[in-house]
Image: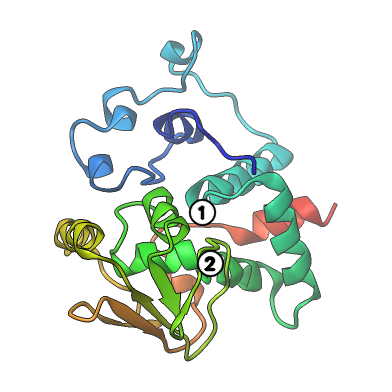
Amino acid sequence: MARYIDAVCRLCRRQGEKLFLKGPKCVTEKCPATKRPFAPGQHGHSGKRRKLSNYGLQLKEKQKVKRIYGVLEKQFRKYFKIASKTKGVTGKVLLQLLERRLDNVVFRMGLGLSRSQARQIVRHNLIVVNSRRVNIPSFLVDVADVVQIKAKDKALNKIKENLELSKDRTVPSWLEFKPTEFSAKVLRLPEKDDIQQTIQEQLIVELYSK
């Protein structure tokens, strides 16, 4: 399966804003986006960014959301196609689909310091949904689903360490999180207000509607 293997901090610098792809490191002075707040490449030092057209703004917003949730173009198009055929506001449904991904839920619970680490936790067969093992990061949780860690001592110690490091991070209200049980219940579908980063989903809808 295709995946991005280059330095993720370059993505934040290219985007021109922090996407918080490296967990706690993103809020420290060691963050490359803070140390080098310009685009990567030999021309990035100029500090000049071209004024974007409407299409450029739409494309940039799509790239931003893809980078935040760690999905590639083919999968992102699939989510948009599902959202466009689902009853409701397309942009809202699209964000709900991305938020409902199992790797994102594990990240939101604080069990992973970043979505990439949360994806690894899922891949390593450490997650059960409704008492069944699930190792597919793109698995979509639904209302009333219970997501829980089932790990042995070594892996569980790492999870506890992650929880301690992410204790200042707020768990969204659509999840009922029980830290002592390493589990969370999906109370409702996520809303846009539950997403901690600013996303202009209408720009993405306009891009794909052309």
Q: Residue at x 53, y 72 (%)?
A: 100
Q: Is residue 26 left or right of residue 74?
A: left
Picture layout, residue 78 above or below residue 180: above
Picture layout, residue 58 above or below residue 33: below
Residue where numbered disc 1 is placed: 69
Residue where numbered disc 2 is placed: 101
Q: Nearer the viewer, residue 76 or 192?
A: 76
For the residues labelled 2 and 1, the Cα–Cα distance comes to: 9 Å
Q: Quadrant of the N terminus?
A: top right
Disc with the residue nearer the chain's start (2 vs 1): 1
Please tell me whether mark 1 sits on a helix, a strand or a loop. helix
Picture layout, residue 123 above or below residue 170: above
Q: Nearer the viewer, residue 103 or 187?
A: 103
Please tell me whether mark 2 sits on a helix, a strand or a loop. loop
Q: Residues within 10 Å of mark 2 (few under 14, many from 20)?
A: many
Q: Residue at x 49, y 28 (%)?
A: 6
Which amino acid type is marked by label 2?
Arg
The image's colouring method is rainbow
Which amino acid type is marked by label 1?
Tyr
Q: Residue at x 41, y 45 (%)?
A: 19
Picture layout, residue 171 above or below residue 157: below
Percent of width and height locating residue 125: 43, 63
For residue 21, what is the image quadrant?
A: top left
Percent of width and height locating residue 164: 14, 61
Q: Residue at x 75, y 50 (%)?
A: 207
Q: Is residue 204 left or right of residue 117?
A: right
Percent of width and height locating residue 146: 41, 85
For residue 94, what is the image quadrant?
A: bottom right
